[in-house]
Image (tube, helix red, strand yellow):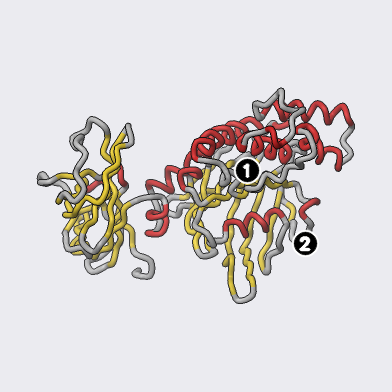
Amino acid sequence: MGAWANEFLVTETIPHTGVSRPASRNAAVELRSVTKRYGDVVALREISLTIHEGEFFSLLGPSGCGKTTTLSLIGGFIEPDAGDIVIQGRSVVGIPPYRRPVNTVFQSYALFPHMTVAANIDFGLRMRGVPEVERVRRIDEMLGLISLPDFGGRRPSQLSGGQQQRIALARALVNHPAVLLLDEPLGALDLKLRKQMRIELARIQREVKITFVYVTHDQEEAMTMSDRIAVMNQGRVIQIGTPQMIYEQPVSRFVAEFVGANVLGGTIEAVDGRAGRVRLDAGSAITAVCPDGLLPGDRVSVVIRPEQAAIAGRPGPGVNAIPGQVLKASYLGTHTQVIVRVPGGIEMTALLAAGGPSEEIPAIGEETHVVWKSDGSLILVEEGSA
């Protein structure tokens, strides 16, 4: 696989910002204060980000957040209204897609139904005038890479959805692009196939060491495959970081909720060193690790990850507790997911480990408490309150 050789990704995280920067690493893609409008609608608002060479980078966010617009700008399918887009150190604004060192894989596989698998992969090579001997070598290389070495003579109609997606990926990779853009490529697959393809995509990216820029609204998908993730909302990049950082150190209520955490609003009552006492909007008083600079009266969000929460009919001493009623309990093998409605109509989720202290599955409608330790939650300043 010498043709794909690249250095191993190394990044350095800037503390408390959620932003990573390259450490002795070249940038594959840079967006510099990019804005894109559609009439009166601002799809992107002066976003800036750097994607490193050889990185699996995901754009994560809800529908309409601007992630597909960002991908389309990199690919050259649309042009920015302001700002610059740089690929491998060269501005590509105004350069058409076919002259950019990128390829794109879409949710629709767009395979030529009348061509064999080998001919589909070969199409781009032919268009570029690659000699036949080299084309045959690259097709064989691609079929081996996607674990379909004997499928060259088949037609797309003879393939499963997952196999067709692999062929689309091989066709995009065969020309050795500097950057591969993937626009929700697993969206048409069923859940089992999606999970299998996550593993395959991550493996292929590690082998070819090409920069992948991946668009998804599925946080689990982004978490399981990415080196770094940019969480987007309303045309802005809210946070950039590793999956672990995004999950464990969200910088805003939006990010915390989007990656599945419980979030409760409240007001600081007292601060003692690193410990903060918070009066929740739901009425309960809890304690949590408090960031520097917060004062009594400040509005905050308390973030509790589901695996940090448990349930208890009678909470013991030294834990935070908020009363509620069980809405749903689902046994998932390794753990049980319990959803509890607490005051204010908020639904909180607790993941109870199998064989743990909360081993019995609670009954629907049962009165209980969601409980967690003070160091099992995170306090965030609410947007616009500081």
Q: Amino acid at mark 1?
A: Phe
Please tell me which residue lies in front, 211 or 151: 151
Residue 112 visible to an observer of this rendering: yes
Q: Which residue is mark 2?
A: 94
For image coordinates 54% across by 64% down, the residue present is: 235
SS assignment at label 1:
strand
Q: Residues within 10 Å of mark 2 (few under 14, many from 20)?
A: few
- Above or below, 134 relative to 188: above
Q: Quadrant of residue 56?
A: top right
Q: Quadrant of the C terminus?
A: bottom left
For the residue labelled by badge 2, is the local secondary structure a helix, a strand or a loop?
loop
The local crowd at label 1, few if under 14, some if 14 to 19, many if 20 or more residues have their Cα within 10 Å, is: many
Whole-Å distance between the Cαs marked 1 and 2?
A: 22 Å
* Quarter of the view holding residue 43: bottom right
Residue 291 in view = no
Point 43% across, 48% down: residue: 246
Q: How many marks?
A: 2
**Left or right: where 368 falls relative to 196:** left
In the image, what residue occupies the spot 61% across and 64% down? 33
- Return the x and y of residue 16 as percentages of the image width and height: 41, 53
Q: Which mark is residue 351?
A: none
- For this orientation, the residue located farthest to the bottom is 40
- What residue lies at 40% left-to-right and 56% top-to-bottom? 251
Among all residues in the image, which is located at the extreme top?
150
In this figure, which residue is indicated by the disc labeled 1?
212
- Residue 289: x and y, percent? 26, 51
